[in-house]
Image (spheres, rainbow, N blue to C red):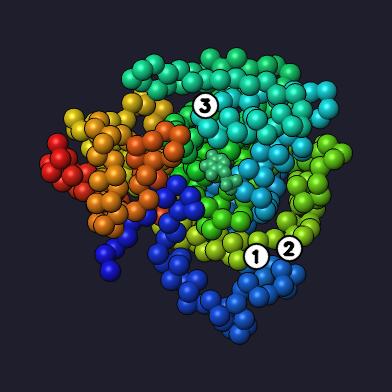
Amino acid sequence: MTKIFNFCAGPAMLPTPVMAKAQQEFINWQGTGSSVMELSHRSSIYIAMAEKAEADLRKLMSIPDNYKVLFCHGGGRGQFSAVPLNLLPKGKSADYIVSGSWSKAAAAEAKNFGDINVININQDSDDNSSLLATTDWPLSSDAAYVHYCPNETVNGLEINTIPDTNGVPLVADMSSTILSHEVDVSKFGLIYAGAQKNIGPSGLTIVIVREDLLGHAQKATPCIMNYKTAADNDSMYNTPPTYAWYLAGLVFEWLSDLGGVKAIAEVNKAKAELLYQAIDNSEFYLNHIESDYRSKMNIPFWLKDDSLNDKFLSESQAAGLTALKGHRIVGGMRASIYNAMPLEGVEALVEFMQQFEKRNG
Ligand SMILES: *Cc1c(COP(=O)(O)O)cnc(C)c1O
């Protein structure tokens, strides 16, 4: 079989050593004679694993002690509801920065739960995509919080400086960028991320929340979405996604063994530079996002002759480079190159792109 490099935006590829370890202990985990997914989340052996996973994540991200780490259900979109339910009291409003399709969806969902001030920061012209600098964002001084998405998975737009909100809690949807480079968690009130891009399989959502933000939820907040309830019960108020939690733990161990977030950030930078260079140095491919705002995780690119799209997709697929089709709302191609994508995968893609250009350019 050809070696496959999977460029899917999510669920995305997982590190091969993690998959191999999960396979090896699939039906007999730690000598229990059972699969980890068959065990009670209240058993001491499961709790020890769960606690280690949290401790490893805390270490990887240097999460300060006054933050809770919650292992939740409901995906990124679940948090689009949970954030306003927990952080937006009646009578207050929240600022929502819109930079692309996910932050737009988050704002639309939040409107169901309170007063939302939408701030669009897209600065597009015909041949250039850019964003308003964080220092120019027109934030309200009395917002309950500011929500933004540092990496827009669909659009390939990244905001690489942390905005200064003047003390207003900053909430970030890091679904497609968590653990890909170092961030100062203390600058945030809350960080959330669906697991299926950079952490593990789908079904698990990580929430990192500053303790003083707990306990102010709207009355109608469902108990399984209430951060305080989750925190008070170590994320086990109801049955957590036990197998996804276990796999996330294996990914955290893998990443720690590689040297942590700082080490993987170097690899991520090298991967992104290689691909953007290949695009920029060609007359055949195109990415019109201003360099400061280019994502290092999700790289959209377009063939100048889009009648070749189907051919590009079928030939890349045959070469073992899968899931390169761009999101339907932006078209073209997209290479998602999260932590688990090795440099070798991006090298293979660049090589394929150059050969394809030679044959068709
Ligand atoms: C994938 C993604 C989501 C949605 O996640 P689900 O788990 O499918 O709800 C939300 N935000 C961002 C930035 C994403 O990349």
Kindly state the secondary structure of the residue where label 3 is placed.
Answer: loop
Q: Which residue matches tag 3?
A: 99
The answer to the question of whether label 3 and label 2 lie on touching residues, with beta carbons closer than 8 A, is no
Q: Which quarter of the rendered picture does the C terminus lie within? A: top left
User: Is residue 123 left or right of 214 when viewed as pictured?
Assistant: left
Question: Could you tell me residue 303's position as x and y percent?
Answer: 27, 35
Quadrant hosting residue 327: top left
Real-space Cα separation, disc 2 to disc 1, in angstroms: 8 Å
Q: Which quarter of the rendered picture does the N terminus lie within? A: bottom left
Q: Which residue matches tag 1?
A: 242
Q: Earlier in the sequence, mark 3 or mark 1?
A: 3
Farthest residue to the left: give it.
358
Along the line of sight, the residue nearer the viewer: 26 or 210: 26
User: Is residue 76 left or right of 224 when viewed as pictured?
Assistant: left
User: Is residue 40 left or right of 327 when viewed as pictured?
Assistant: right
Any mark on residue 239, and which? 2
Q: In this orientation, does residue 65 appear?
A: no
User: Is residue 197 left or right of 227 when viewed as pictured?
Assistant: left
Position of residue 168 relative to residue 41, above or below, is above
Judge depth for marks 3 and 1 and give the one in front. Answer: 3
Along the line of sight, the residue nearer the viewer: 36 or 214: 36
Kindly state the secondary structure of the residue where label 2 is placed.
Answer: loop
Kindly state the secondary structure of the residue where label 1 is placed.
Answer: helix
Kind of residue at badge 2: Thr
Residue at 75% in and 70% down: 42
